[in-house]
Amino acid sequence: MFIFDGRSIPHDGRQSVAAALLAAGIRSWRSTRVEGRPRGVFCGIGVCFDCLVTVNGVPSQRACLVVARSGDVIEPQDERRERT
Amino acid sequence: MDAPGVVVIDAGADVVVIGAGMTGAACAYYAARAGLTVTVVDRAGVASGTTGAGEGNILLSDKSPGPELSLALHSVALWRELGETVGDAQIELERKGGLVVAASATEHDTLAAFADRQRAAGVEAHAVASHELPGYEPHLSPHLVGAVHYPQDMQVQPMLAAAHLLRAARATVLTGTCVVGLLRDGTGGIRAVRTDHGLLPTSRVVNAAGVWAGRVAALAGVELPILPRRGFVLVTQPLPELVRHKVYAAGYVANVERSTAGLEISPVVEGTRAGTILIGSSREHVGFDPAMSLPALRGLAAAAIRLFPILAGVSAIRAYRGFRPYSPDHLPIIGADKNVPGLYHATGHEGAGIGLAPATGHAIAALLTDRRPHVDLRPFAPERHHVHL
Amino acid sequence: MSTYDLVVIGAGPAGLAAAVTAADAGCRVAVLDAGPRPGGQYWRHRSGADAHSHTDWAVFAGLRARFDQLHHHPDAALWFVESRPDDVGPQFAVHTHSTVVYGRRLVIATGAHDRVVPFPGWDLPGVVTAGGAQALLKGQGVVFARRVVVGGTGPFLLPVATGLADAGATVVGVYEANDPVRYARHVGAVLGAASKSTEAGRYGWRMLRRRVPYRRRTAVVAAHGDEQLTGVTVAAISPLGSVVPGSERHVGCDGLAVGFGFTPQVEVAVALGCETFMDRDGSLVVRIGPDQATSVPGVYAAGEVTGVGGAKLALVEGHLAGDAIARSLGRAEPLRAGERSRLLRIRRRLRRFAAALHAVHPVPAFWPDLCDDQTLVCRCEEVSAGAVRQAVRELSAGDARGTKLLTRAGMGWCQGRTCGYATACLTAREAGRPVSSVDLQGHASRTLMQPITLADLAGDD
C-alpha cells in the first residue's frame, strides 16, 4: 500500500504509480497551470509528462515511470493553485 | 544580372531592413512611424537568430556611464512607451527591476562605487543591505553581503516584442528570404536589394543582420568587424514564483566588459511569465561553433545554485544557444555608412541588443528622415573601426 | 574511465540486434536503455511468463541469451550526449542520471513513440495513446478503462484492441480512419511479406471472437466529458478523406486509445548533427547509408529512427549496424558476406512493405479541420490551435520554430515530443504550404534529453 491524497492504494510491487492509481479507479491527479484542467496518464511511457505527481515530497515525477513502493506518500499536483 | 535577380518581388519600399530580429523590428517600427514604407527581409524567420536565443534583458544596471548608457537610458524610456502602445501583456514586458548582488566585501565595495557613478549619470540605484535582501528575494543565498537594486531594469519576451513591433509597423515581412546582393547605381547609391527570391527595389537599406551583419556589409564591399560571442541559457521546469527580479552577480558587469577567449560564467537568474526560470550567462569566443558545451551548462547550473540554493532540486528542461554580435570596442555600430550612400548599419549590441533596440531604431529612423537623432551617435559611427583596418 | 568499442542507445529489437552482433565479433559493448527490462516497446514485458502474449518471443529470448557478453544499463535514460573525438578517432560520451559511458561507436536505436494529432477533448483523462494502453497492459498488467474505443490509423490498433479485449475490457469499437482494403493496390510491395498479412488475419480472428466491431473510414472526431472521458463522437470519412457531414454519432466509453502511427525519437541524432529528412509518413528520420551509418563519422542508426518500419526491419537494421561497426573496428567479421547480402535483401523488401503501409495509413487530412481555435495543440504549455494560427497570420511566423518561439508550443516539459508534428503541420497549413523537414526540425532539437536537476547538472562528471 502507498498513500495517495490520504487514501491507501494497493500495488503489486512492480507497478508504476500511474498503473496502481488507474487500477484503483483514479483517472487524474494533476491540474494544469493555466486552465486548471485535470490530467492523468496519456502516453504511459514517459514521453508526455502529463502524469506528474509529487512522490515523497519530490514534485513533478512521472507517475508512469516511478515504481510504487509501500509507504510512499504520493500527492496530486495542483499547478494552478501553486502559481498564485 | 543572373536569373533570381530578374523578378521584382516588391513594389518598392522606402527602406528595406535586413534582419527580422529585435533591432530590425525596432528600425522598421520607428521608420514606419516616421512615415516611411518598410520591407523587412530575413533569411530565416522573425526573431530566429540572436533575438530568439536571449533572455530579454532591458538593463541599465550593467552599463558604465558613457555612450552606451545614454543609449540605454533613452531605450528604457522608449520601452515604457512601447509597453503602453503595444500592451505590456502582449510582449510580456515586466517592470520588475534588477538586483545586483555581491558575494564578498571587495565585490560589494566595487559595486557600490560603480552604482555611485551610475547615479551621477541619471540611473536610479539603491543600496540594499544584507539583512534587507530577503525582502527583495526570499530565496537568495544567506551568504551574500549586499546588493544594489535598479528599479528601471526590465524584462521583455523578445520574440513577441519583435513580432508585435513588425506588426505595428505594418511592414512587409519576407521570411525565408536570403539577401544575396546590394545593387548600386552610377553614383554608388543603393538601387535595390537582391534576394534569392528576386529584387526589392529601394534606395535605403538598414543592415540589422546582427551577428551576420558583416556578411551583409561585404555585399556592399564594406568591412564591418562584427564577431560572434557564444552564450547558453538554461531553462527550468515551470515553477511558482521563486525569483522576483532580474538577479545577477556583480561579476557579470566585469565579464560583459572583458574580452578574454575562455569560458566565462556569471549568473543571471530570472523568472518568466511562463513560470520557467532562465539561467544565463556564459561567454565564449569560439566563432559559430554550434555545439552545446556541457562545461558551460554545468557552470551555469552551479552558479545559479550559489545565488539561489533552492534551485538545486529544480530541474532544467532545456537549454539554448545563441551568438552575440560584438564589435572590437564592445560598442554597437549605429549609423550611415560613409562609403555607400543609402546604407545604414544597426548591429553589434552584443548581449544588450534587446534593451538597446528601440533607441537604435529611433536613431536610425531619424537618420533615414534627415532628422537629428535623440542620442549622439558619434561613438557608434561605423567608420570608427576603419582606422584599424 | 573505460571506453567501450560500442555504446548502443536503446534495448529494443534494433539495439539488441546491433549489440549482440557486435559483441559476437569481439567488440566491448554497452547497452543503455530507459526501461527496467530489455525489449523496448515491442517486447515490453513484466516477466518471462508473459511470453505467450508476444510475437517473436523466441527471437527475443535468443538475443537475451547472448546478453551476458555485454554491459546492460537498465533505467538509464540519457540526458546528454557529447562528441569528443581524440587522436584514435571518434569518441562519444553518453550521460545518464547514474553514469557516463564512453564509446568509439554509437548506435542510435531509440525507437519511436505514438504519433497523436489533436482533436477536441483529447486532453481529457481517459484518453491515452494506443502505445500507452499497450504499455499499461503489457508492462503493468493494468487495463486502463472498462469501455474502450480504439481509434486512429494503422495496423498497431489491432493488437491494442485485441489485447484489451483479451484482458477483459469491453472494446466498443475500433475506428480506422483509412481504408486498408486499398492494401490490394500495393500488392506488389506486400509480396514476400506474407507473415505481416497473416498476423493481421490472426488479429482479425481474435477481434471476431471477442465481438469487437471494426469500422474502416471512420474516425473519432471529438472526446467528451467534464473532468474525465464519458464518450466520443465518431464520424464517417469520405473516400476523399473528409468528415461526412451528418454521419456523427455518440459512443459512450470511459477510455479512448488513439494513435496515428509513430514518431521516431531522433533527438540524439539531431544533437550530434546527423542529417535528417522527412520520410513519406511525415516523420523526421535519420538519413543512413547502406551500412546504417549516419552522416556523422562513428554514429550509426537502426530501427524506427531511420524510418518507421516495424520490429522485423529493426532487427535486420540492428544486425547490419552491429556488423558494419565490428568491421569498421577491424574485428572478426560476424556475418558472412552471403548472410549480409541476404539481410540487405530483406531490408529492401521490408522497407517496401513499410512504404506500402504508410501509403495505406497516412495521417488523415481532415484532422486540422477538427481543431477549432480553442482545441489545445501543446498540452504542456496549453497552447491552442488558434494561437498557432494567429502567430502565422498576424505575427509573421514562417515556420514551426517561429510558432514555437511566439506561442510556446513545444517549449514545455515534453519538449515538443507530443505536439511537434501537429504544430508543424498546423503552421505549414496556415502558411499555405506543405509541411517540410524544416518545420519538423524546429521541434526535434532537445539538447537536454531528459529533465535534470541543477544539482545533478552542476555535479555530473
Image: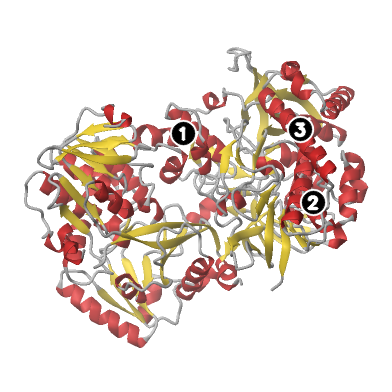
The residue that mark 1 highlights is: C427
Q: Residues within 10 Å of mark 2 (few under 14, many from 20)?
A: many
Indicate the position of residue A77 as horizontal and vertical percent values.
60, 54
Q: Give the residue at the far bottom of this rendering.
A: B105
Q: Mark 1 lies on which chain?
A: C
Question: Residue C430: percent from the left, percent from the top?
Answer: 44, 29
Indicate which label's residue lies in the foreground, 3 or 2: 3
Question: Which tag is nearer the camera, tag 2 or tag 1?
Answer: 2
Q: Which residue lies furthest to the left in this view?
A: B371
Give the numbered dot on residue C16: 2
Q: Which of C460 and C85 is in front in this view?
A: C85
**Residue type indicated by callout 3:** Leu
Could you tell me which residue is drawn at 69 percent across and 63 percent down? C103
**Pointer 1 and pointer 3 on the same chain:** yes
- Nearer-N-terminus badge (3/2): 2
Labels 2, 1: one chain:
yes
Q: Which chain carries label 2?
A: C
Label 3: which residue?
C350
x then y, percent, for residue B230 = 40, 62
Where on the picture, by quarter, is residue C156?
A: top right
Q: Which chain carries label 3?
A: C
* Mark found first going from the N terminus, 1 or 3: 3
The N terminus of chain B lies in quadrant: top left
The amino acid type of the residue labelled 1 equals: Thr
Q: Tell me: residue B150, above or below residue C140.
A: below
